[in-house]
Image: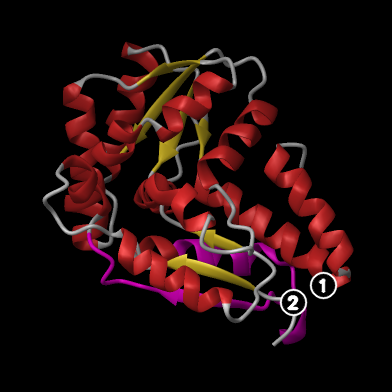
Amino acid sequence: MERFFTVIGGMGTAATNSYVRLLTERTGATKDQEFMNYILVNHATVPDRTSYIMDHSQPSFYPALREDILQQSQLHPDFMVMVCNTAHYFFDQLQALTTVPLLHMPHVAINEMCRQYPKAKKIGLIATAGTIADHIYENEIKAAGREVTLGDQHVRDMVMQLIYDDVKGTGKANPDRFKEILRIMRDDFGADVVVLGCTELSLANEQVPLPEFNLVDPQSIIADKSLLLGKAFRQSVANGRHLLAEVQAGRA
């Protein structure tokens, strides 16, 4: 297979399926051959990312992702995406393993946020405790010149319940819990925009659309960028590489 990309997923599987659905729905294909070529690595047995970040005595998820990156690199995809925000804890180490470009979902998402909401000053972030502790989104938002609010412990506990008890546990978002989290972030903490810093939250956004809130959905954004890049590489490798550099620099 030529002109394809690799998706490192399975963290969790339902959220990865959401990414694939978005990719399929947005391709605009009218026949089989117009869809994207990609390899999906649904590595469901990767150890829990947040557990390790919060307690290094727990199993590390790095060896599993290292194996995935090295295996896929041998197939020479045009680029790779990793559809788990918390897994970006090891982004630098994983990118150092290969010459294949690995898209940095938080970086790409915050660049897109700045284009979508140029006047937003205070950005709410909801994510796993691991992503919050890692500061990966917080640092990206601050580097973009915006203020960050993480809410309080009550809202962060609600977010973990939504991610682990609802979406991971049952495959379904709790609509009332999701809406209340967003309401608190907007009304009580003054967030102009809320970043959904976990792919389970992206699945919640797919299942329970709430247009009354200004949201940044990194998984939705990375699906769009994957599609954009996949089409560019099909036109020519030169086009793909040029657009890839633009996406990584935040210009596309």
Q: Is 96 inside the magenta-drawn segment?
A: no
| Residue that extends furthest to the front in the rendered view of this protein | 96
Foreground pick, 89 / 213:
89
* Residue found 41% across the figure and 40% down from its top: 197
Quadrant of the drawing holding the N terminus: bottom right
Quadrant for residue 128, please give it. top left
* Residue found 78% across the figure and 44% down from its top: 246
Which residue, given by chain and number where applicable, does mark 2 sit on? 3
Task: Specify the label residue 234 is tagged with.
Answer: 1
Residue 135 location in percent, x, y? Answer: 37, 30
Label 1 neighbour load within 10 Å: few <14, some 14-19, many 20+: some
Span shown in magenta: 18-47
* Residue found 64% across the figure and 14% down from its top: 119
Specify the amino acid type for callout 1.
Arg
Pointer 1 with pointer 2, Cβ within 8 A:
yes
Residue 20 location in percent, x, y? Answer: 52, 68
Q: Secondary structure at mark 1?
A: helix
